[in-house]
Amino acid sequence: MLSVEASPALIALVACRGALGPVPDVVLSGVNHGPNTGHLVLHSGTVNAVLTAAYHGVPGLAVSMNSTAPRHWDTAIDAATQVLEWMLGTAVGPTVEVPTLSLNTPDVPVEQLRGVREARLAVFGSVQAEVSEVGPDFTTFSYRREESEPEEGTEPAWLQQGYASLTALRGPSELAMDFGRLVT
């Protein structure tokens, strides 16, 4: 058994480079306390672990629960198992993108989970970060639950309806841009 103390993305990096043994077939990250929804997934260690894995050609699944104090772990495990089975049966090759998925589950008993739905990233996540205090040598962030009505088809909307949300993600990529005379 191995124990690694580092950020999730760094652990995924060293695993995908073979430093922890054979390169994994898949990277599973989580289960995260609290949802990873909206464009704020960019700041999630749980999600960045699977984005790092994908960069190295390894499929990944980030799993989060829509609760900061989850009680129904079996629900996340059940949904993640279904998604992992699908992922491992999906062909990955030079013409197919490596699956990089974010799964958010409601904190409900397994029998109350209504299913898994494909979701779009919400413009804003379920949890919003705010700078709450700035001092001479510190900055404090606070987090608050977003109470507005979520946009249909997004992760928070599916979670609110009792479904697990599944979103396919893509990591950083190049953008073709004309730099004009700046580049000589």
Image (cartoon, rainbow, N blue to C red):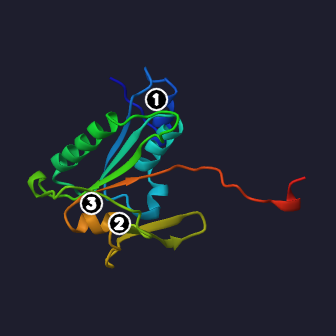
Q: Quarter-wise, where is residue 1 in the image?
A: top left
Question: In the displayed structure, does residue 177 sit left or right of residue 156?
Answer: right
Of labels 3 and 1, earlier in sequence is 1
Q: Earlier in the sequence, mark 2 or mark 1?
A: 1
The answer to whether any part of residue 7 appears in the image is no
Q: Amino acid at mark 2?
A: Thr
Q: Residue at x 37, y 58 (%)?
A: 36
Identify residue for label 3: 66
Q: Are marks 2 and 1 in contact (CB under 8 Å)?
A: no
Residue hosting label 1? 15
**x then y, percent, for residue 176:** 70, 55
Q: Position of residue 85 (x, y in %)?
A: 27, 37
| Quarter of the image where one finds residue 104 | bottom left
Percent x, y of residue 15:
46, 29
Distance between mark 3 and mark 1 Cα atoms: 28 Å
State the image coordinates of residue 152 (x, y, percent, origin top left): 32, 72
**CA–CA distance in space, label 2 to label 3:** 14 Å
Q: Amino acid at mark 3?
A: Asn
7, above or below 18, in the image: below
Q: Nearer the viewer, residue 92 or 103?
A: 92
With respect to residue 157, does 175 lie above or below?
A: above
Task: Tell me if residue 114 comes above or below residue 55 in the rendering.
Answer: below
N-term mark: 2 or 3: 3
Residue 154 - label: 2
The type of residue carrying mark 1 is Ala
Which residue is at the front of the view, 31 or 182?
182
Which residue lies most toward the left here? 111
Badge 3 marks a residue whose secondary structure is: loop
Q: Nearer the viewer, residue 86 or 127?
A: 86
Q: Nearer the viewer, mark 2 or mark 1?
A: 2
Query: Do tag 2 and tag 3 residues touch (Cβ < 8 Å)?
Result: no
